[in-house]
Image (cartoon, helix red, strand yellow):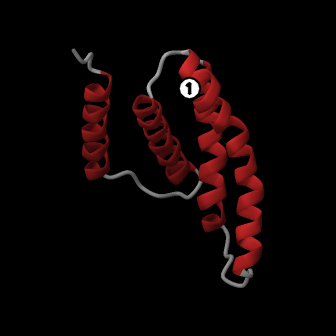
Amino acid sequence: MRTIACLLVSNCFMTYAWYGHLKKNTADTPLFKLILLSWAIAFFEYVFMVPANNRFGRMEGYSAFQLKTIQEVISLVVFCVFAIFFLGESFKWNYAVAFLLILGAVYFMFYPSR
């Protein structure tokens, strides 16, 4: 559970670092300044991502493939919420279908192998 909590917090920072500037008109802001600001925010992403993957994930018995799959699903969920509520984008039916297909991939990632 610590793994998922850390990945959730990490992805909130990551999503804001990558897409937060889209909310504001930053066309006049120098690109270098936007990059430095994003890196400053992304530092906190790594504060939570590294323990989630290197410590907690392995201690909780996840493989590297499973950790990456969990991270991607959390990333998509966080981004979806961010895009709808922060950026004001609409959620379309084809996005729902794509997410369902990804959930199918998650099912097979955690399907017990023999």
Q: Quadrant of residue 57?
A: top right
Identify residue for label 1.
Answer: 4
Horizontally, residue 83 falls left or right of residue 2, namely left
Please name whichever residue, 4 or 113, is drawn nearer the observer in this view of the structure.
113
For the point 64% across and 24% down, which residue is it? 55
Q: Is residue 15 above or below residue 73?
A: below
For the point 67% across and 30% down, which residue is it? 51
For the point 51% across and 53% down, which residue is it? 83
Q: Position of residue 65 (x, y in %)?
A: 40, 33
What amino acid does circle 1 point to? Ile
Horizontally, residue 31 falls left or right of residue 107, namely right
Q: Count residues near mark 1 (Cα–Cα under 10 Å), then give few for <14, some for 14-19, many for 20+.
A: some
Residue found at the very far left of the displayed protein: 114
At mark 1, the secondary structure is helix
Q: Quadrant of the C terminus?
A: top left
Horizontally, residue 74 falls left or right of residue 18, namely left
Q: Position of residue 61 (x, y in %)?
A: 49, 16
Horizontally, residue 75 falls left or right of residue 110, namely right
